[in-house]
Image (cartoon, helix red, strand yellow):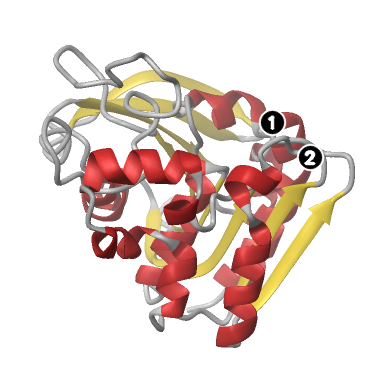
């Protein structure tokens, strides 16, 4: 597979890169970032995926996330995809709203026109990009974990529940846990997936759990001063679903923190360490 190196820097003894390629899934060029920590030649390293939130690109966590020291310490590759297709001809929100369209792919495969041709982010993160990572980087794809923030936290929870054999561990920051019931999610799902709510269930963490999808454990951090906590995120819905299904949810309500990368960067190294403990061994 052909990828282009856009930028590359040495950091914490490893290499932080930004890459671009032509995506078959989205029909556009896609950009992503990868941090490869220092390692012995010929060794393969576990992979931690990080899915970003509304309005973001790969750059938000790459520039603000403060994960590289922890990834270097624990020997983990950190992969950050973009949040949507981009480019000329890619449809956006007709009214220019920030919570839908460009930068807001919601990690679904859209089925509705005009979005279905390009907005295939589920296929991109679950099929196409993993093949690139396996081919182009020293990645041990038998040891993968996933995390994300806000819309990306939604994506991480959905991916972890739908593909429990792929991801050894799952965490999230400020996730949209029940998108079918909140304004951000309802708007996106109706436009991407149509009005049939049964078609939304495959992309809703709470409903996936209700439908029998399970994991042993989940780690979720939310900020008590997050302005979206009660209207959009609703962590109590995930708490109730996990309680009913016997899933070990560690839900940490971090006092005083908001929805920003000041919050994410404070606890991201802690998440890396938590995943590292679960990625050890064969």
Q: Nearer the viewer, residue 232 or 30?
A: 232
Residue under the point 60% across and 23% down: 63
Disc sitting over residue 33 in the figure: none
Q: Residues within 10 Å of mark 1 (few under 14, many from 20)?
A: some
Count of all numbered marks drawn on residues in the image: 2
For residue 85, side relative to residue 276 (left or right): left
Disc sitting over residue 261 in the figure: 1
Q: Identify residue for label 2.
A: 266
Where's residue 209, x and y in %? 46, 76
Q: Nearer the viewer, residue 52 or 136?
A: 52
Q: Is residue 145 visible?
A: no
Residue under the point 54% across and 64% down: 170
Residue under the point 29% across and 55% down: 126
Mark 2 lies on a secondary structure that is helix
Name, please, the residue furthest toward the right.
Answer: 255
Residue under the point 41% across and 19% down: 97
Mark 1 lies on a secondary structure that is helix
């Amino acid at each position: 597979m052909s990828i282009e190196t856009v930028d590359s820097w040495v950091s914490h003894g490893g290499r932080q890169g930004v890459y671009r390629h032509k995506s078959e899934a989205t029909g556009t060029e896609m950009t992503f970032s990868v941090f490869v920590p220092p390692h012995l030649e010929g060794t393969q390293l576990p992979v931690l995926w990080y899915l970003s939130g509304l309005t973001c690109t790969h750059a938000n966590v790459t520039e603000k996330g403060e994960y590289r020291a922890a990834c270097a310490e624990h020997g983990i590759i950190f992969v950050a995809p973009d949040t949507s297709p981009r480019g000329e001809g890619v449809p956006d929100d007709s009214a220019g709203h920030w919570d839908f369209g460009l930068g807001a792919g919601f990690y679904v495969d859209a089925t509705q026109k005009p979005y279905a041709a390009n907005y295939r982010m589920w296929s991109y993160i679950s099929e196409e990009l993993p093949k690139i990572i396996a081919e182009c980087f020293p990645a041990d794809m038998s040891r993968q974990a996933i995390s994300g923030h806000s819309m990306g936290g939604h994506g991480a929870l959905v991916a972890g529940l739908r593909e429990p054999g792929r991801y050894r561990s799952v965490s999230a920051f400020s996730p949209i846990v029940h998108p079918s019931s909140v304004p951000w999610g309802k708007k996106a799902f109706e436009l991407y997936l149509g009005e049939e709510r049964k078609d939304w269930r495959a992309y809703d963490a709470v409903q996936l759990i209700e439908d029998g999808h399970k994991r042993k454990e989940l780690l979720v951090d939310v900020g008590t001063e997050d302005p979206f906590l009660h209207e959009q995120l609703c962590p109590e819905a995930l708490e109730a679903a996990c309680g009913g299904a016997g899933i070990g949810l560690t839900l940490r309500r971090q006092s005083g923190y908001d929805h920003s990368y000041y919050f994410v960067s404070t606890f991201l190294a802690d998440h890396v360490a938590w995943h590292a403990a679960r990625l050890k061994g064969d």
